[in-house]
Amino acid sequence: MSFTEAELEMIGRMAREAALELAVLSSTRKNAILHAIADGIEEFAPQILAENAKDLANAEAAGLSDAMIDRLRLDQSRISKMAIGIREVAMLPDPVGEVLAEWERPNGLRLQKVRTPIGVIAIIYESRPNVTSDASVLCLKSGNAVILRGGSEAFHSNCAIVVAMQKAGKRAGLPAGAIQALPTTDREAVSVLCKAERYVDLIIPRGGKQLIERVVSEARMPVIKHYEGICHVYVDKAADLEMAIRIVVNAKCQRPGVCNAMETLLVHKEIAAEFLPRCAEELQSRGVELRCCPESLPLCGPKAIPATEADWSTEYLALILSVRVVPSLEEAINHINRYGSKHTDSIVTADEKAAEVFLARVDSATVLWNASTRFSDGGEFGFGAEIGISTDKIHARGPMALPELTSYKYLVRGNGQIRT
């Protein structure tokens, strides 16, 4: 059954009213609501697991991959982790009300720039049901109402988690409409949501490039996103080669299907003959397919295959890696800025000057020196949690946590001043 603008208007009105209430809730009240929601997730675990079983059965019948089914699967342990994650968000500092700047004008006006909630945030995502609770509680902690549109493959699980959060949160004073999910698997619901600029202040899409491009093309409100994670590690001529191998293997193999995994390895020509055979052996022993430039191909063993031009701009999300030998630091930077996705890139070197040039000139949201790209993550940055990663340059960039779910406004206090 198709999802209509009239149905969205009802959801949007409720969300807007809830956002006005959430914006003025104290940190103590918001934290109490989050603790109640965490308790509710555990209390309603049997119902959530029963609905999750429906999604798993549908996924198996549809022939989804084992990896996709594992992302969908919930069990008691994963539900407990969801609840723990909610309680951890409750412990984080509340960004709302933070005074970013304050000053007084010569005419006596006193001004403050203060963090405020954005309002109503729509989150469109795929696959993992735990995103439903993660996104919801981050929005609530930052004083925002949330409208969720999860993937159809997790529809029953997502609905059950939302119901649990709504019922448990209500006991602690959660405003009606603060957490809502679109009650449909209709693909056109995304288009309807993208047109709801009267009620939705911001959309955050999380998923494949095709979904994100669709949201960007149709949305009438701001969108925070990243399209791809084409991440690089550059091994400089002054690199500690043992360190470089550890970083490269971790960046590619620790979890290859995520956006901060390395997709291209760049190696300085002066150390390629020594470094690449050893590194290739480590990677290939872990099942990595190497797609190599003409210079690196003979150094990476008989299993390596030639790279094509398309490989330099491909996000594999798999145990596949493109490899290129470069003549200089300058060429490594040029390659990254040309083919990368402005997500995360790393240099391995003992040369501080080279590292600082790389850090300054690579135009990406996160740039690292002597560390794996896998650290580009809100939890690893010490944010406690993240709503996603942005490659935009306005408002939010890189891992996004609670502060990025706020805006600001100016509070001006006078005593009768008028402008002449």
Image (cartoon, helix red, strand yellow):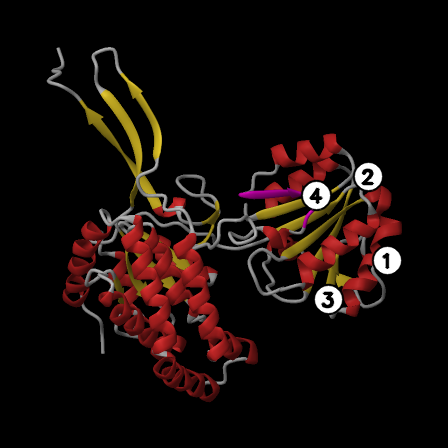
C-alpha separation, residue under disc 2 versus residue under disc 3: 26 Å
Res. 289 mark: 3
Magenta span: 365-371
- Could you say which quadrant of the image residue 332 lies in? top right
Q: Nearer the viewer, residue 28 or 161?
A: 28
Amino acid found under the numbered disc labelled 1: Pro
Instruction: Estimate the x, y position of residue 380 in percent, counting from the top left.
Output: 57, 52
Of labels 2 and 3, earlier in sequence is 2
C-alpha separation, residue under disc 3 versus residue under disc 1: 14 Å
Amino acid found under the numbered disc labelled 2: Ala
198 sits to left or right of 273: left
C-alpha separation, residue under disc 3 versus residue under disc 4: 22 Å
The image quadrant where one finds the C terminus is: top left
275 sits to left or right of 382: right
C-alpha separation, residue under disc 2 versus residue under disc 1: 18 Å
- From the image, tell me which residue sits under label 2: 238
